[in-house]
Image (cartoon, coloured by chain):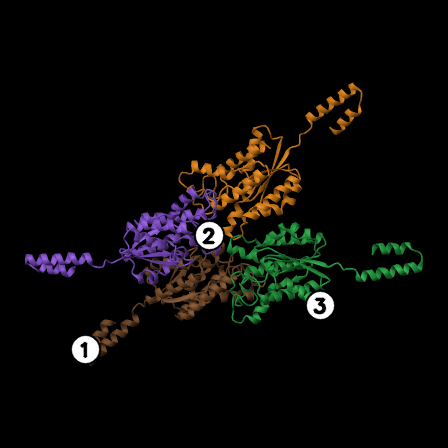
Chain colours: A purple, B orange, C green, D brown
């Protein structure tokens, strides 16, 4: 197109100019459009979300149904056990090396959960610092960023999930980072809690949107896919 | 009185009977009434509640103001760091040896808190078992039992206190034990949460009813005293 | 035999006395001897030790090989996840109700391990108190007690198993309880460490005497069986 | 000196060359020598080591006694509670901005300790990754690096300090990083353990080189100063 523009400006003949202009428009329309490469960057939830039935294939299907499959390309990059600083440490290899246009960050469950299961959770203030550093580095490379609140550790609706207090705290950190950095937010925690309030009338600790209190069942993958797809279309 | 009764039954003479009866009534009225001995059985909150300004002297004052000081005698038995099984282990020495009429159990904060601070919290099911065993042993000795839900670890009102989920769970266990064993319940957790909802409008983590997220300030001691005194009068 | 003794004393006739005496001796020799009932009281290691290939069937085999199968009867009573206070809480149901002659206590791994895996380990001083209370209660019923140090969480020989310090501390508590209460000690921790020092030359974290750092493999079950059998024969 | 060299090369006259050469030598000898700026980069132990009686003033004194005060300049940069990734996060502000020649890294206690005290210790593999990244970044700027093993959490000599296993593991990581990156190692853990073996004959948990199991007393500061000074002189 740049060559066309130069030819156009260079050419003083009106007729020739018209031909060049028409050609450029024609070529542009049929040129294979560059797809937006989206990386889903997260932990085991994202890792499992990459498999058949996971939220990533579901997003891909939604994308196709809306005839937007030419616009997006989806890559899952979730590693089991990852916390925010694991994402930070693998930014170069797993994100920048793949030259994405969009990164969807979905992290935080292990930062909270590991406090109880192995004594190696992440302090809230460090969680924020590393998260913000990741955002900053992505933005510096003109990569668009969508961030998600961590969803749940336990689906009970009577406020007795052991780590709900911390989950709310870390979700608030993600919410404030979205606002502060002017980023689209996928508030999965809010969505999951609303959904459970409505459908988990028996106060079960899993089986509504998760299979084991943390990892998504089919319905959970569907809900995550819908929420993320909404944000992706708006990017 | 027993002797009087026997004399009364033994004596067939009506006049003599009348004299004996009158004497018994007379003597009973002026006999020094036995006070109900109340032991407050708990952790550092109770230990500090025994000091000047603590909830126990406050209960004593309420008691006097209502002219009931002849009816009650209050003993604080709180030890810093105690969990439910510590109470269990010192039942003989610190409760039965003192022959109380009433025991107010106020325990649970450390059972939850120590999960995070030293890795030695109490599993929920063991918390219930030891708590119930204590109740059973007290009842076997005809000691009246009042139980209290653990109040707070953190006073934030936006549901981000780290251990709120667990605190709610353990408070629920105490509530169900009260119902199951037909015991008066002092629901301090509910009271503290309601109070904070109303007065902690700035979402502070301490300073409303506690001085340090856990231990009571003057207002906290007053609220606990009022709630416990209501239950004690009803016993 | 009591009946025989009474007949013997009652009978003045020498000949009859001889006959009675001979009968008693004859009957005693062929009378089914009362076996010593041994309960192995512990956690998942004991639970798994009850299965085929476990240390309990191995002890039974050793017992038979030494023609002592008439002297002992073995019962496994291990429950996964048990800590010292779980043993305490199930003393009545799982020990006294079964009227054992000997109890082999093998506990402590979870009291240490759960500090890291769920935040519900047992404080060292409470570990000692509950352990000692169990010993006292068993002794009161004239049950013989054998106690074992907890073996290992991790088999590395370069002193880098995460919880070795605590394991040594809790093993020392068991050792001092054995001495203080004059009980036979099966020092599995010492045995396992010596064995690993000799055979675990590659500093593996499991696979020498355990299959997973904690639970016994075939060799581990054999070592435990040998050590326990030595103590049982001496009882 | 560069100017001198250029003049020297430019000048063809032998006599002039000699004068220039002599001037350069003369000036260099009396030029105020640039001191090596040393930053001690660590946690509360370093923070306290900056105060009077701390290891940094002690190193400064040793330096003066050996008439080397013109060669070194010491800056303490320790922050209470810091773990390896805190050092990483403040590299720009607290190290590079101050243009040091040498950085002495002394970190690791909180990476281990916080597993037990707040559930936010650092996984061993992440400890290594962040540590190595810090080394790499310092080396890229031609800053010399000296690294130290974390010393102790508890001084008991009977192998019952709760976290000794982990401390040994993390010390081993530092040792292997020194070897791998060809860096001077100050093996404080080895030194402290040897010292305690010799002098802590009563198996105390503190009071030998620490005042509280972790932070250094006067003797501890002296030992650390001596070990670090040896490494600094050799740089």
- Left or right, D30 with respect to A157, comes to left
Report the residue at 53% width, 55% height from top: C114
Name the residue furthest front: A65
| Front one among D70 and B196 | B196
| Front one among B106 and A48 | A48
Q: Are marks 1 and 3 on the same chain?
A: no
Locate residue C76, reporting x and y percent.
Answer: 64, 58
Task: Give the CA distance from mark 1 to mark 3.
Answer: 104 Å
Residue C21 visible, this angle = yes
- The residue beneath circle 2 is A212
Q: Secondary structure at mark 2?
A: loop
User: Which mark lies nearer to you, 1 or 3?
Assistant: 3
Mark 3 belongs to chain: C
Locate residue A140, reporting x and y percent.
Answer: 28, 57
Mark 3 is surrounded, within 10 Å at the Cα level, by few (under 14), some (14 to 19) or many (20 or more) other residues, namely few
The quarter of the image holding the C terminus of chain B is top right
Relative height, residue A148 to residue B98 (above, below): below
Q: Secondary structure at mark 1?
A: loop
| Front one among A6 and C194 | A6
- Left or right, D194 with respect to B94, comes to left
Locate residue B179, reporting x and y percent.
Answer: 56, 38
- The residue beneath circle 1 is D11
Mark 1 belongs to chain: D
Mark 2 belongs to chain: A
Relative height, residue B172 to residue D129 (above, below): above
Q: Which mark is residue C66?
A: 3
Locate residue C223, reporting x and y percent.
Answer: 62, 66
Whether residues under marks 1 and 3 lie with C-beta atoms below 8 angstroms apart, the answer is no
Whether residues under marks 2 and 3 lie with C-beta atoms below 8 angstroms apart, the answer is no
Report the residue at 37% width, 52% height from top: A128
Mark 2 is surrounded, within 10 Å at the Cα level, by few (under 14), some (14 to 19) or many (20 or more) other residues, namely some
Q: Secondary structure at mark 3?
A: loop
């Amino acid at each position: 197109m740049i060559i066309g523009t130069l030819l156009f400006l260079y050419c003083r003949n009106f007729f020739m100019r018209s031909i060049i202009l028409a050609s450029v428009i024609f070529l542009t329309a049929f040129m294979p459009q560059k797809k937006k490469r989206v990386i889903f960057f997260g932990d085991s939830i994202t890792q499992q979300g990459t498999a058949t039935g996971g939220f990533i294939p579901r997003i891909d299907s939604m994308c196709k149904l809306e005839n937007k499959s030419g616009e997006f390309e989806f890559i899952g990059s979730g590693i089991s056990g990852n916390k925010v600083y694991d994402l930070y440490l693998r930014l170069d290899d797993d994100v920048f090396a793949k030259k994405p246009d969009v990164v969807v960050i979905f992290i935080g469950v292990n930062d909270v959960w590991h406090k109880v299961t192995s004594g190696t959770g992440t302090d809230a203030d460090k969680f924020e610092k590393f998260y913000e550093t990741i955002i900053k580095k992505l933005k510096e490379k003109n990569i668009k960023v969508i961030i998600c609140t961590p969803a749940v550790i336990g689906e009970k609706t009577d406020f007795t999930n052991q780590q709900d207090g911390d989950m709310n705290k870390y979700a608030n950190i993600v919410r404030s980072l979205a606002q502060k950095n002017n980023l689209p937010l996928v508030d999965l925690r809010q969505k999951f809690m609303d959904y459970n309030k409505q459908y988990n009338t028996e106060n079960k600790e899993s089986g509504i949107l998760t299979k084991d209190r943390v990892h998504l069942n089919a319905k959970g993958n569907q809900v995550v896919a819908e929420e993320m797809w909404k944000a992706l279309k708006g990017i």
